[in-house]
Image (cartoon, rainbow, N blue to C red):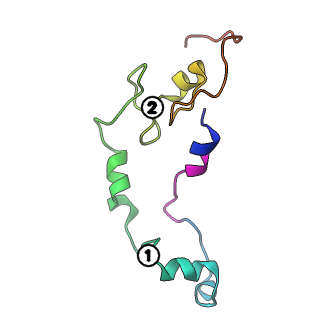
């Protein structure tokens, strides 16, 4: 479970958008991105800092079951977040689970 604020953050893709070469030079939004330093062109995504953090074997795990989490910086694994009714990334209470009969699996 992920709250709306954490859902907006999302995860960036290796190829965020594919545009025609003519769109880049004709004053589209893509040309503004290329001219500013927001996005690095020709950067190897496998060698970036975020990729190195992703494969950290001693990274932070779930606070309840100590299992590895899917997202970087997440506080709960998806199963514990569902059981507790919390956002798995920030830990904010989303759902009142007092009236639910949930399994402990």
Which corner quadrant holds the N terminus?
Answer: top right
Name of the residue lying farthest toward the right: 99
Q: Within the magenta stretch, is there residue 76?
A: no
Q: Which residue is mark 2?
A: 75
User: Considering depth in this image, is 39 or 67 the residue closer to the camera?
Assistant: 39
- Position of 1 relative to 56 (above/below): above
Q: Quadrant of residue 61?
A: top left
Q: Position of residue 52 (x, y in %)?
A: 32, 51
The 10 Å Cα crowd at callout 1, few under 14, some 14 to 19, many 20 or more, is: few
Query: Residue 88 location, x and y as percent?
Result: 53, 32
| Residue at (48% x, 28% y) in the render | 77
Question: Residue 84: where, in percent of width, then height?
Answer: 57, 19
Q: Residue at x 60, y 44 (%)?
A: 5
Magenta stretch, main secondary structure class: loop
Q: Is residue 83 depicted above or below 86 in this figure?
A: above
* Among the 4 quarters of the image, the one containing residue 79: top right
Q: Which residues are magenta?
A: 7-15
For the point 55% across and 65% down, which residue is it?
A: 16
Report the side of 13 relative to 7 (left or right): left
- Circle 2: element type: loop
Residue that carries the numbered disc 1 in the rendered image: 37
The residue depicted at 61 percent of the width and 77 percent of the height is 19
Which numbered marker is on residue 87?
none
- Which quadrant is the C terminus positioned in? top right
Q: Is residue 41 above or below residue 61?
A: below
């Amino acid at each position: 479970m992920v709250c709306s604020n954490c859902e907006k953050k999302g995860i960036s893709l290796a190829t965020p958008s594919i545009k025609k070469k003519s769109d880049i030079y004709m004053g589209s939004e893509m040309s503004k991105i290329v001219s500013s330093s927001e996005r690095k062109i020709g950067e190897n995504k496998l060698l970036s800092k975020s990729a190195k953090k992703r494969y950290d074997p001693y990274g932070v795990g779930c606070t309840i079951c100590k299992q590895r989490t899917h997202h970087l910086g997440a506080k709960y694994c998806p199963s514990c977040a569902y059981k507790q009714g919390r956002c798995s990334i920030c830990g904010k209470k989303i759902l009142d689970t007092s009236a639910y009969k949930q399994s402990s699996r």
